Amino acid sequence: MDAIKAITERVSVTKLTGPGPNEEQLNILYRAAFRAPDHAWMRPWRYLTVKDEGLTRLGEVFSEAGALTTPDLAEDKIQKLMDMPKRAPVVIVAIANIQPHAKVPAMEQRLAVGAGIQNILTAAYALGLGAVWRSGAMAQSNHVNKSLGLATNEEIIGFIYLGHVNCKLKKAPVLEKDDFVQDWPIKTAD
C-alpha cells in the first residue's frame, strides 16, 4: 500500500479477530515503531507483546487492579476487565522509558513513544490488519505497571490491540485544513 494512502486513510478498528499478526508482520510493526522521531537517539521506548495465555494473565492483572481501586467492584465489572485484553488476538503494551536528559524533556520522550504507536497503527493498516490504540485507567494503574515489570521511570503510553478486521471499516473523515491551520503571523483586518 502507498504510504500516503496508509497515512491519510487509516482508521481505528475496535472489532478484531484472529489470527493475530504473524512474526514477520510483528517485526515490520516494530521496525516501523523504531523509526519514530527520537531526539538524541535515546530510544525512550519499550514494548511488550501479549498474546495467547498472556492475554488471560493480562486480564487477571486488569481485574486485580480494578478490585484494588474499587474493593466492592461488581462481578460483571470484574469480568469486563478480565475480558478486555481478549478483544484482540495480540496486544502490544507501549512503554515510555523516561531518562534524565538536559535537552530532551520527559514530555518529548513520551511523544516519541506516541509517534512509534502511530507508526505501528499505520503499518498495521498498510498490512491489512486492524488496530486500535487504547489507554485509560489500566495504563495509569500502579498495580498494572508493577505486574508488567515496569521500572519506576517507566509508564504505559498505550495498549495497541491488533488483529484482523471483523467489521466494515469506517470511512476516514475528511477534515478541512482551514479549520485547523493558520498562517502566522495572523493577519488582522484593519
Image (spheres, rainbow, N blue to C red):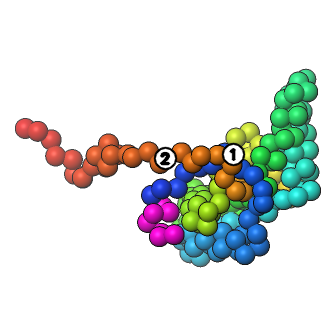
Quadrant occupied by the C terminus = top left
The mark nearer the N terminus, 1 or 2, is 1
Residue displayed at 84% across by 29% down: 77
On the image, which quarter does residue 108 sit in? bottom right
Q: Which residues are magenta?
A: 1-7
**Secondary structure under the numbered disc 1 in the rendered image:** loop
Q: Nearer the viewer, residue 106 or 139?
A: 139
Residue displayed at 70% across by 71% down: 25
Residue ID for mark 2: 171
Residue 36 in the image, given as x and y percentages of width and height: 56, 69
The image's mark for residue 135 is: none
**Residue type for callout 1:** Lys
Residue displayed at 57% across by 65% down: 126
Residue 122 seen in the current view: yes
Q: Main secondary structure of the magenta part?
A: helix
Asked if 176 appears above or below 160 in the picture, the reply is above
Side of 183 where 171 appears, left or right: right
Residue 174 in the image, given as x and y percentages of width and height: 39, 46
Residue 133 seen in the current view: no
Q: Nearer the viewer, residue 28 or 147?
A: 28
On the image, which quarter does residue 102 sit in? bottom right
The image's mark for residue 15 is: 1
**Residue type for callout 2:** Lys
